[in-house]
Amino acid sequence: MYMRETGNAAGPVLLLIHGGGVAGWMWDAQIDHFGPRYRVLVPDLPGHGHSHDMAFTTSAAVVAELAAYLGQLPAGTDVTVAGFSLGAQLALELAASHPEVVTRVVITSALTQGIPLPSLSHWLVRLTAPLARQTWFAKLQAKSLYIPDDLLDDYIRTSKTLPAESLIALTRANAEFRTPSAWRRFPGAVLLLAGAKEPRALREGMRQLDHDHSKSELIVHEHAGHGLPLQYPEWFNARVEGWIRANPA
């Protein structure tokens, strides 16, 4: 899996995990903000961006690879893991299953209650996947995902290179995700971020995450939809940085 390393090599680590259908470029505003003070790690998940030639199989496989990467860091390294949407599910699972490599975690807009997945859904995804490679369709999708104009070309390129099999696998992984039982036992601090205009099931799941963890803080942006880091990057950056400073290792 491709991993971009940037920022302050001597600073604490910030791992940013993107959502499905985009790539590491979605975090450009965060890289600019946190780079002077943090060592920023930004993967392109399998099937996406620089990792488009790698198949996305399961969330567990991705989490295992991320854990192995973080496990190579010196013992005691301060590591904040932040994820959005599918990336938030991965961040949650990473923190729950490998707490030894995660100091604190930021979960943004994670679907945790699961949704019914029709048996024919993978055929529907396969049939509609070619649309994602059409520029006109990608532009329509970009608006619904709050992709800013300066990242539109990146989104179109990512859409055109995302294999149908990976799209099917990540769609299933996202829909079937359930909060792991070990989540309650994660010893670090937890920041939960969501938009008030996101689907009810997602918001309810985020509230349940907050209820289940003793060191969590939930903040809901009253105007945001499903795209908080892209829709309101300055707000997102300020909340995350302030929270990290308030929760030292």
Image (cartoon, helix red, strand yellow):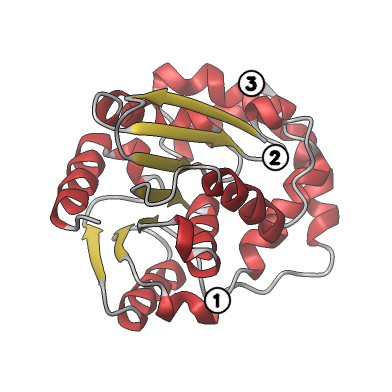
Q: Could you tell me the amino acid type at mark 3?
A: Arg
Q: Which of the two residues, 24 or 158, is positioned nearer the viewer here?
A: 24
Q: Are marks 3 and 1 in contact (CB under 8 Å)?
A: no
Residue type, mark 2 in image = Pro
| Residue 145 horizontal side relative to residue 8, left or right | right
Residue 207 lies left or right of residue 158; in this view the side is left
Which type of secondary structure does the marked residue at label 1 adopt? loop
Question: How busy is the neighbourhood of tag 2: few (under 14 within 10 Å), some, or many (20 plus)?
Answer: many
- Identified at 39% across, 32% down, the residue is 40
Residue 99 in the image, given as x and y percentages of width and height:
46, 65
Dot 1 corresponds to which residue? 180
Q: Earlier in the sequence, mark 3 or mark 1?
A: 3
Q: Which residue is mark 2?
A: 46
**Does 134 sit above or below residue 243?**
above
- Dot 3: what SS? helix
The residue carrying mark 3 is 157
Q: Earlier in the sequence, mark 2 or mark 3?
A: 2
Q: Quadrant of the C terminus?
A: bottom left
Q: Residues within 10 Å of mark 1 (few under 14, many from 20)?
A: few
Looking at the image, which is closer to me, 7 or 202?
7
Camera-side mark, 2 or 3: 2
- Check disc 1 and give the amino acid type: Pro
**154 or 42: nearer the eye?**
42
Q: Position of residue 235 (x, y in %)?
A: 20, 42
* Mark positioned earlier in the residue sequence (1 or 2): 2
Q: Which mark is residue 79?
A: none
At which x and y percent is residue 243? 19, 53
The local secondary structure at tag 2 comes to loop
Residue at left offset 48%, top offset 42%: 73
How many tags in the picture? 3
- For the N terminus, give its image quadrant: top right
